[in-house]
Image: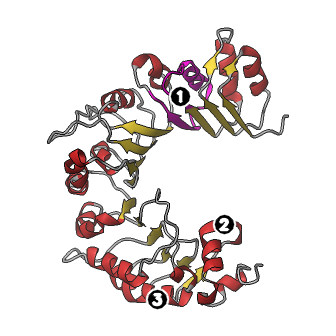
Amino acid sequence: MEEIQSVTLDSVIISHRLLKSIAKLKKLKRLVVRECDLDQDFTEGDISTLRSLPIEEFTLVSVPETSTSSFVLLRGIPNTSDVVLDAHTWDDSSMSSVMNSQLTRLTLGTVPYEANLPQLTHVLNHLPSLTHLRIASLSLVSLRHSGAGPAFPLASSSLPRLRVLACPPLLAILFPKRALNELDITGYISEPAMSLVHVYSNVNDNTIQTLARTTAAIHTLSIYSDMVSHGDSIIRHFPHLRKLHIIYGDRRSRVVVGEESLTSVLESLSIGFRNTGEGYLPIRELKVDFTLINPWMVDLQTQRKAIATYIEATFSQVTRVGLGAGVQWHRNDIWSDWQAYVQPARIEGKLLRALEWFSNSIIDYKRCFAKAGLLDRD
């Protein structure tokens, strides 16, 4: 029992006895509490004993018609833990334990855009210690048809320590005047109804306008491919950018095999970031992710040629390139030749499927696949 590192509690009553048992798991790193109630026999001492555990990730899930009493467990979670919160309600009574905490890393599940946005900002206004914030997705279902979005009264002095932010583009209002180092605006937005198209279609324009108001020295940026055409604006507003991550395709699509042309994608990327009159690009690391599996993912000669033709010409300072599926390209400096490698311990399932499905199209480069043991698999 003492060797247990992960515990999941699902739809149970959390009692004094259960908390005492959990407190004995001295190697516990991950605790998940899903749709649970806290028994009335618990004590503050039961909760405080959790703080001595090496919990790295704490997930708390509540759904409509269930109690939020388990939220008080946040009082016993180490401040440095990654807290994942998927809540159905954001009222002060439910969120008091969150607002009174000293959390540093918080991940939120789906947030209804209009219904819960004011409550969300109220909670964030009470979290000055937060350094990492991730909002996985937004639901636009309840948004009324109007020209303006709902009020988002985040105080200008809120989140003074925030350094890493990941959210859907509609929440770009979060990052002006924050001293961010990393920004990810690839969070999911539920597919809008026709009455909401005006909100969804203006996302990128509004996001770019917001970029002009940021004073942060952002060095890592993640965007969707539909923002590539705004590449020049991104360069202009993020002069310290070192890592750029671009996602092509819908990560929730049920389609698996794609027909994207690598050269077409990289050509559009090159055009979008042509950087007219702005000097050289400071980007050192470029990652282009494709949600679908494409035949060229097993053709390293094609990848190498595309890097030389499009990426080197536009991102002259880049020394690391990832084109999805787990193959990494790197060079020691801008004068060195490119090398491809795959870490055997981190081989992605997408690459294995591509090697299986397109086995007749495999073209290795400097024995990259061979060295990783990928050509001898049954």
Looking at the rendered structure, the kind of residue marked 3 is Trp
The quarter in which the C terminus is drawn is bottom right
Identify the residue at the far right of this view: 1
Q: Residues within 10 Å of mark 2 (few under 14, many from 20)?
A: few
Question: Which numbered mark, 1 or 3, is in the foreground of this view?
Answer: 1
Left-right relation of 43 to 68: right
Quarter of the image where one finds residue 110: top left
State the SS at label 3.
loop
* Residue to which mark 1 is pinned: 62
Decide if residue 203 is in sight here: yes
As drawn, 95 above or below 293? above
Q: Residue 320: horizontal and vertical position, in percent?
A: 49, 75
Residue at point 68% right, 30% down? Answer: 9
* Residue to which mark 3 is pinned: 335
State the SS at label 2.
helix
As drawn, 125 above or below 96? below
As drawn, 180 above or below 378? above
* Residue to which mark 2 is pinned: 346
State the SS at label 1.
loop
Q: Residue 170: horizontal and vertical position, in percent?
A: 29, 47
Dot 2 or dot 3: first in sequence order is: 3
Q: Which residues are magenta?
A: 61-88
Residue at point 35% right, 85% down? Answer: 313
For the residues marked 1 and 2, what is the alpha-carbon distance in whole angstroms?
33 Å
For the residues marked 2 and 3, what is the alpha-carbon distance in whole angstroms?
28 Å
Q: Residue 314: horizontal and vertical position, in percent?
A: 33, 81
